[in-house]
Image (tube, rainbow, N blue to C red):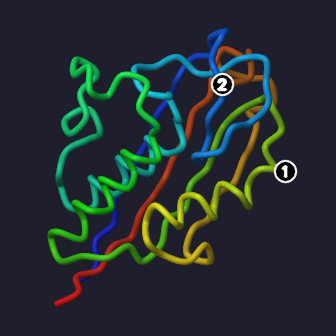
Amino acid sequence: MIRIGHGYDVHRFTPGRPLMLGGVRVPYEYGLDGHSDADVLLHAICDALLGSLALGDIGKHFPDSDPAYHNIESIKLLAACAALVKERGYSVVNVDATVIAQKPKLAPFIDDMRQTIAAALGTDASFVSVKATTEEGLGFTGALEGVAAHAVALVQNNE
């Protein structure tokens, strides 16, 4: 049996924090605001994985009211979500994700993101797609207020 899940997340820019996307530090004048490191790409992938098995969302498993997750690296949350998938007898077939950001330009960091995500999922980078796009100056991402990400994950039963 195969199942698919979709994830979406958004975080606003804030000064004084590093910008983490796909588990990679991206040089930029702003980071993202959030309880964890606010890695919007990894949060969307987490929600896609959790959604594929109807396990709720990232907030259910790692609530922002819990101090244990304050400033946690989101790559650890992704690995935990992958473990939940595995515990239920499934494995990740592939992940396809899109980051929506007017700035910074992400192309130089995409391959590192794919490798980092794949490692957390226990798969090969050839099964992880990360793309970046702008909104041509439209919406909150176009106005440089923040970053959004969409992701889909396909999982299959191992039994």
Q: Characterize the local packing of mark 2: few (<14), some (14-19) or many (20 or more) Cα atoms within 10 angstroms.
A: some
Q: Residue at x 66, y 24 (%)?
A: 18
Image height of 41 relative to 140, above or below: below
Front disc: 2 or 1? 2
Would you name the residue on which mark 2 appears?
18
Q: Position of residue 73 (x, y in %)?
A: 46, 37
Residue 93 on image: x %, y %:
42, 77
The residue shown at (39%, 70%) is: 154
Three-letter code, disc 1: Pro
* The N terminus lies in quadrant: bottom left
**The quadrant where residue 60 appears:** top left
Q: Secondary structure at mark 1?
A: helix
Label disc, if present, on residue 153 of the rendered structure: none
Q: Amino acid at mark 2?
A: Pro
Q: What residue sits 54% from the left and 62% below the top?
A: 96
Task: Check residue 108 in the rendering and tell me which mark sits there, or answer none.
Answer: 1
